[in-house]
Image (cartoon, rainbow, N blue to C red):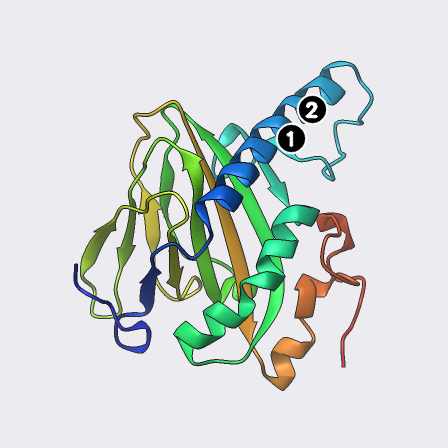
Amino acid sequence: MKKYLFLKDGFEIIKQACDIKIASFLYDYLTLKKEVCVSLFEKKYLAPSETAFGILGDIQCPETFSIYGDVAMDTLLKNLKNKIEDISKLKLYETYSYCRLYKNKDVLKKHKDRFSCEISTTLNLGGDLWPIYIESIDKKEVQISLKQGDMLVYRGNLLEHWREEFKGEACGQVFLHYNKKTKESLKNKFDGRPHLGMPDYFQGTVKHG
């Protein structure tokens, strides 16, 4: 397999970035988290606007379980930062994690991400394989298949990326997002939250620096 140089193509593939046992644990955790979230909403223990336990659909993937800033996933965000810095040759601030448990027929339309996703990753936690497509800096369309524990590091706010219709039953992916360390990005550390692990409604409540 060709080794894509991060600074040349805008992305890099890291094989076994996460130990398979940890990835499997997090996949099971994500599956159970969805079950808990569904039960809490159905039994009306959570208000429809509550997001701390996850949501059952966002703009990109309606009716698909996802969660922002989960404590376990934000811990992974922190623990893998050194590895991402080694690959990108950049010093980074953690911004946030986001994960989804994709379902059959889900589609991820071609898009770029916001500033908090300047340096992004997608990590395969488990389930059925589902290729991701990315447009490299030289405008070449590349299809990438990640096995469990593999991770793609890419310029999330620069390169368009997408997934075609999912033919499998379930696929767990966690997205880990970072900013390059600059005076400007210091203000965006932790995506404006007081610290990692906080829900999305804490965005913008803290000004760093």
Name the residue at 75% across, 21% down. 40
Whether tag 1 and tag 2 are in contact, CB under 8 A, the answer is yes
Q: Residues within 10 Å of mark 2 (few under 14, many from 20)?
A: some
**How far across and down, in percent of the image, does residue 177 sit?**
54, 61
Q: State the SS at label 2.
A: helix
Query: Picture quarter containing residue 156?
Result: bottom left
Across and down, in percent, residue 114 comes to 52, 60
Q: Which residue is mark 2?
A: 36
The label number, if any, that marks residue 24 in the structure image = none
Residue at the image point whose x is 30% and y is 25% from the top: 167
Q: CA distance from mark 1 to mark 2?
A: 5 Å
Q: Residue furthest bottom?
A: 183
Q: Quadrant of the N terminus?
A: bottom left
Q: Is 207 drawn above or below residue 174 in the view shown?
A: below
Q: Residue at the spot x=76%, y=62% of the render?
A: 195
Decide if residue 170 is on the left or right side of residue 34. left
Q: Which residue appears at 30% of the width and 31% of the height?
A: 165
Q: Name the outermost residue toward the top.
A: 43
Locate residue 173, reporting x and y percent.
Answer: 46, 42
Q: How many marks?
A: 2
- Identify residue for label 1: 33
At mark 1, the secondary structure is: helix
Quadrant (top left/top right/bottom left/bottom right) for the C terminus: bottom right
Mark 1 burial class by Cα count in 10 Å: few <14, some 14-19, many 20+: some
- Residue 141 higher or lower than 47, as above or below: below
83 lies left or right of 78: left
Residue 144 x/y as whole percent: 26, 50
Going by the numbered disc 1, the residue's amino acid type is Lys
